[in-house]
Image (cartoon, rainbow, N blue to C red):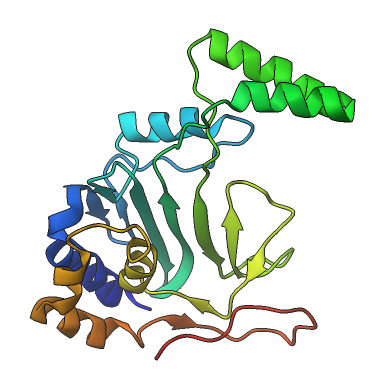
Amino acid sequence: MDDQVVGRSLNDINVCFSKILLDSNTDRTASTISWRNYKPGIDKGFAYAAVYQRLIDNRQYSFLLEDNSFFQFFFEWENQELRKAKLAFYPTPVKISGALNSLLESAELSGVDLLEELYFGAEAWVNRGIDIVNTSYIRLDYDSKVDTHSKCHIQVASINEIRITSQYLINPFNFFTWITEHLKFKQFDSILASHGYLQALNYHRTRNHDFQMTEATFPYLSSLNT
């Protein structure tokens, strides 16, 4: 997947999905495609709501949707070969109603120290005006030079112990469509029926990054709708 394909996919997202976008913030350099004021790194050990808000405040996204969820698309090339990529979706935090009472009830019934610790930690959050949420982000990562784990994989949040290996790095247009089709936007049916979307889909659906995998003895994602 070269920079022309990635650049076109981001442009097609901007055009085809304009009805559900609040902001587009993509950026391009000689060797990267990302977002303006790009800051590397992944927050670890922080509540998702705090991570989400910090990223929103600093416009650390490629596309912001009308429900305030957002996407990050980062690609880096080295000698015209794809070196790294990150495709991530951050949903809007969903507040858990009655979360504190639920944690207390579970702690009292189980007697497990960890649940009691979680309860008193959650109580401190509530007292400080911090909502308890049950949401986190999902990302598809690619690193051509890594040898300690799979080169391409899906992760939920920053849980490094669980990586779902993938044979393909999905084109950003396909990743965006795959996520947004489940978000129930009222405009989505008209978007899917538009001539511009159908043309873009026809172009992008087979333009994913396929790479040579070493023989694997574990399950991995390999099937794409082509």
| Image spot of residue 71 (x, y percent) | 35, 52
Most distant residue in the top direction: 127
Taking 134 as reference, is 19 above or below it? below
- In the displayed structure image, the side of residue 170 where residue 152 appears, left or right: right
Taking 206 as reference, is 62 above or below it? above
The quadrant holding residue 125 is top right
Most distant residue in the left direction: 195
Nearer-the-camera pick, 212 or 112: 112
| Image spot of residue 111 (x, y percent) | 90, 25
Nearer-the-camera pick, 168 or 50: 50
Q: Is residue 21 visible?
A: yes
- In the displayed structure image, the side of residue 142 where residue 109 appears, left or right: right
| Image spot of residue 33 (x, y percent) | 31, 59
The quadrant holding residue 20 is bottom left
Q: Residue at x 17, y 61 (%)?
A: 187
Q: Residue at x 37, y 52 (%)?
A: 72
Q: Residue at x 30, y 39 (%)?
A: 37
- In the displayed structure image, the side of residue 123 where residue 74 appears, left or right: left
Most distant residue in the bottom direction: 226
Taking 45 as reference, is 144 above or below it? below
